[in-house]
Image (cartoon, rainbow, N blue to C red):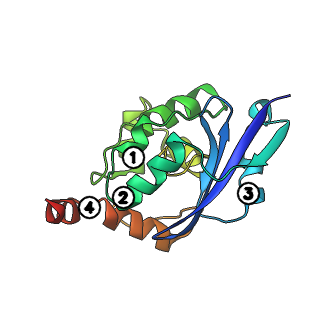
């Protein structure tokens, strides 16, 4: 029976919970204090047999804290594990290459994923992303720059994009 751990941390945008496999890979994460909002997002093939609360998730907890403090690249170092169809898994990998402060449109995201006409499939990959923040679906916008939807709320998405904006980052130096 596989065991996963979860923890909720306070962040600038409210509570953030992560579910982490025993090897340290994030299985689900998002801006909620309720782990039961995350567990249905985990692929059935990855679902842990036992889920236990743990105050400190090591590298994952450190990355969450450091990201919210301004180290925008730290999330790239954290392993994630999601399962779905071939395109969606590839699209999630591609999404991890979209840099902070350089959001892309859904059309650009589809092209980066190798299927420029598959805009709806790219949008579905964002919508079904279980590992928010670590697979930064908040970095995908509608054509023209409108925010579009976000599982964790448009206000959180707006905060994340402002947090990652080049103007803000330049002001830190």
Residue 37 location (% of width, % of height): 74, 59
Q: Is residue 24 above or below residue 17?
A: above
Q: Which residue is mark 4?
A: 165
At 44% across and 32% down in the image, what residue appears?
A: 115
Number of numbered discs on residues: 4
Q: Earlier in the sequence, mark 1 or mark 3?
A: 3
The spot of residue 96 in percent (x, y) is 42, 38
Label 1 and label 4: CA atoms lie apart by: 21 Å
Q: What mark, if any, has residue 67 been given in the picture?
A: none
At mark 1, the secondary structure is helix
Closer to the chain start, of discs 2 and 3, is 3
Q: Which residue is mark 1?
A: 107
Residue 16 seen in the current view = yes
Q: Which mark is residue 35?
A: 3
Density class for disc 4 (Cα within 10 Å; few <14, some 14-19, many ≥20) is some
Element carrying mark 2 = loop
Q: Residue furthest front?
A: 55
Nearest to the eye among marks 1 and 3: give it: 3
Residue 7 occupies quadrant: bottom right
Q: Which mark is residue 143?
A: 2
């Amino acid at each position: 029976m596989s065991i996963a751990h979860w923890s909720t941390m306070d962040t600038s945008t409210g509570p953030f919970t992560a579910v982490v496999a025993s090897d340290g890979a994030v299985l689900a994460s998002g801006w909620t204090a309720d782990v039961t909002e995350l567990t249905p997002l985990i692929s059935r093939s990855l679902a842990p047999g036992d889920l236990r609360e743990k105050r400190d998730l090591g590298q994952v907890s450190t990355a969450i804290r450091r990201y919210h403090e301004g180290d925008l690249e730290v999330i790239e170092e954290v392993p994630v594990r999601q399962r779905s169809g071939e395109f969606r898994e590839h699209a999630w990998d591609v999404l991890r290459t979209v840099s902070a402060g350089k959001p892309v449109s859904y059309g650009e995201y589809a092209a980066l994923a190798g299927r420029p006409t598959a805009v709806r499939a790219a949008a579905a990959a964002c919508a079904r992303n279980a590992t928010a923040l670590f697979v930064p679906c908040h970095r995908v916008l509608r054509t023209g720059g409108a925010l579009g939807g976000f599982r964790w709320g448009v206000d959180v998405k707006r905060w994340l994009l402002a947090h990652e904006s080049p103007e803000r980052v330049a002001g830190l130096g």
